[in-house]
Amino acid sequence: MNIAFEQPTLWQRAKPVFTGFDGPLFFAVLALAAAGLITMYSAGFDHGTRFSGHARNMLLGLGVLFIVAQIPPQQLMRLAVPLYALGVSLLIVTAVVGITKKGATRWLDVGLVIQPSEILKIAVPLMLAWWFQRREGQARASDFLVAMALLALPVGLILKQPDLGTAILVLSTGLYVMFFAGLAWRLIVPLLLVAAVGVVSVVMFSESLCQPGVPWPMLRAYQKNRVCTLLDPGSDPLGKGFHIIQGMIAIGSGGLDGKGFMKGTQTHLEFIPERTTDFIFAAFGEEFGLFGCVALLAAFSLLILRGLMIAADAPTVFTRLLAGAITLSFFTYAFVNMGMVSGILPVVGVPLPFISYGGTAMVSLGLGLGILMSISKSRRLMQS
């Protein structure tokens, strides 16, 4: 007797891929991606392939998201040490034989040009979450010192390139892991006080500190100039202060409801520098105004709040620390980029997630979101 087996449909085969996907998180991602495509179409109007390239990068990031979302968190934990070792090794190779552009050695040619520091945005929180998972419930001061060493190595190599923006992002993700792992407030508060005193001192004595030839500890001359330009962009309006001034003019000229899509004069008359990358928020603010900026902030807020909820419900120390750090890294991206474009933070070269142009950055975003999806998916499967 022959028994006929019914072949599963295409949807039945694909359904396990989507089972457990986090709806609110994916909705926030789609909203931000749509905003990014619309803004890039306008801001990149004379860049030829910028819009199509941005769409291609988004599809690549989306593909990475779907692939990583299928990897169980237990498998991700096994990748922590190899990925960290690979990232640090590539940073060392970059320092020796990397490609130098505009005085910075940040890129490596391995058949295609990559920026190895992007790997550390994911590798560092993975590594530190793995480290604290092994010390679940018994983390001591010495464990935090080891974590600081694991964090300081890649951050130091990235600063050496130099790439202050990426170094800030990698440093922040590592600190977020340590905070969620239980870093004592008695250690955090003194650091915050020292930072606050430093900021106040620079503001109060900026006139003398910003004089040419006055060195700042641990900062290069161009980094010092960025801080001084932030405090007084009008001191060099056609030079170092041009970026900040034009960004603020563009955002301010948008008013409440903006000038309209494809009608931004600062954008289309090319007054906004780097308008498809670091300063794309200025182009967005000019064309969509305060209402558009509030909607964009709402989408970012939904992404961050949903990520923190996933972290709070995560079943293990590793997944909780990793989800929390990745989520707050998105906050750092958005806060630093919007802050520097709005003139409240120094210009440090941090892209706006999903909005700014950049292939490597989009892949790292896809990796981070895929990990969040994987953690959310594993929690739902455990509950069912």
Image (cartoon, rainbow, N blue to C red):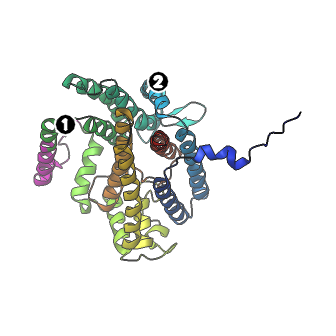
- Amino acid tagged 1: Pro
Q: Is residue 25 above or below residue 319?
A: below
User: Residue at the spot x=46%, y=25% of the render?
Assistant: 78
Q: Nearer the viewer, mark 2 or mark 1?
A: 2
| Residue that mark 2 sits on | 82
| Residue that mark 1 sits on | 217
The magenta segment is: 193-218
Q: Is residue 70 above or below residue 48?
A: above
Mark 1 Cα within 10 Å, few/some/many (few <14, many 20+)? few
Badge 2 or badge 1: first in the primary sequence = 2
Mark 2 Cα within 10 Å, few/some/many (few <14, many 20+)? few
Q: Check if residue 209 falls in the magenta segment.
A: yes
- Amino acid tagged 2: Pro
Give the left or right position of residue 214, taking residue 69 as reference.
Answer: left
Q: Main secondary structure of the magenta part?
A: helix
Q: Can residue 90 be seen from the camera position used here? A: no
Q: Is residue 66 above or below residue 246?
A: above
